[in-house]
Amino acid sequence: MGHPFDPFRIARLKTELAALGAVTEVGFAAGGAEVARLQRLAAELEALNPTARPARAAALLRGRWHLVYASFGLLRRSTLAALSFGALPRTEVDVVEIYQETEPATGWYDNVVHLIDADGLPATLVVAGTYAVRDDRAIDIRFERALLYGERPRIERPIDPERHPPLLTRLSFLDDGFRLVRGSGGSLYVLERLDPAPMRWAREA
């Protein structure tokens, strides 16, 4: 059995997870065998978590993260309403890529979706939220508003807090470039950090 903090084993698991995320198209084209293996690898990596208090590890959490995989059944063709917790209209869009931006200094916790709108124009949706530390390994996330911008005038709408209370999220693995997150119902999110210190956040565009 490997050492709990064996860097070579951790690196191998992260590489395999990233490759499986690509095969499943971040979860858009998830197949049974690939998903089962991805879940097994994630559990193995979680057992090797090198960060004792990930929810309080601000320097590791900060930055722009690319979604490698999500287990909740992503759809390439979606609607603005589905992506924004009902804040925006039910206009159909095509999802291109999904990111997350986290700034512990301000508590920002934003989902960022690059998409193509119904007229074929590129746009960016920011589901802007904040997070609060619940304990050493868990945070509460509250999404507060949806911002849509691109080649059309910017749109900003609030998210109903009564219909969408805070989401309990567990940080099951965290190091300086990789993160595993467990949401409600055991949903799994795999993210890879692209930039620990972006010059500008998507919500500020």
Image (cartoon, helix red, strand yellow):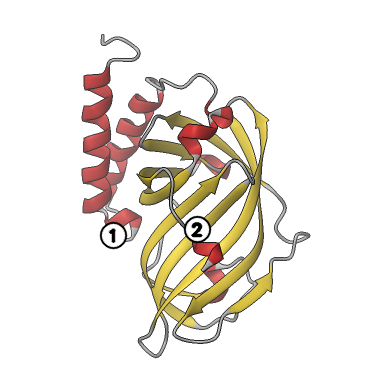
Residue 24, how many percent across, how many down?
26, 54
**Front residue of 32 and 91:** 91
**Front residue of 39 and 12:** 12
The residue sitting at 69% across, 48% down in the picture is 166
Q: Compared to 35, does 27 lie above or below?
A: below
Q: Is residue 199 visible?
A: yes
Give the numbered dot on residue 47.
Answer: none
Q: Is residue 33 visible?
A: no
Snapshot quadrant of residue 40: top left
Under circle 1, the secondary element is loop
Residue 180 located left or right of residue 6: right
Residue at which label 2 appears: 201
Under circle 2, the secondary element is loop
Q: Compared to 142, does 105 lie above or below?
A: above
Q: Amino acid at mark 1?
A: Ala
Real-space Cα distance between discs 2 and 1? Answer: 29 Å
Q: Compared to 181, does 135 lie above or below?
A: above
Q: Residues within 10 Å of mark 1 (few under 14, many from 20)?
A: some
Residue at which label 1 appears: 29
Q: Amino acid at mark 2?
A: Trp
Residue 11, how many percent across, how many down?
24, 28
Residue 177, how many percent across, how many down?
35, 36
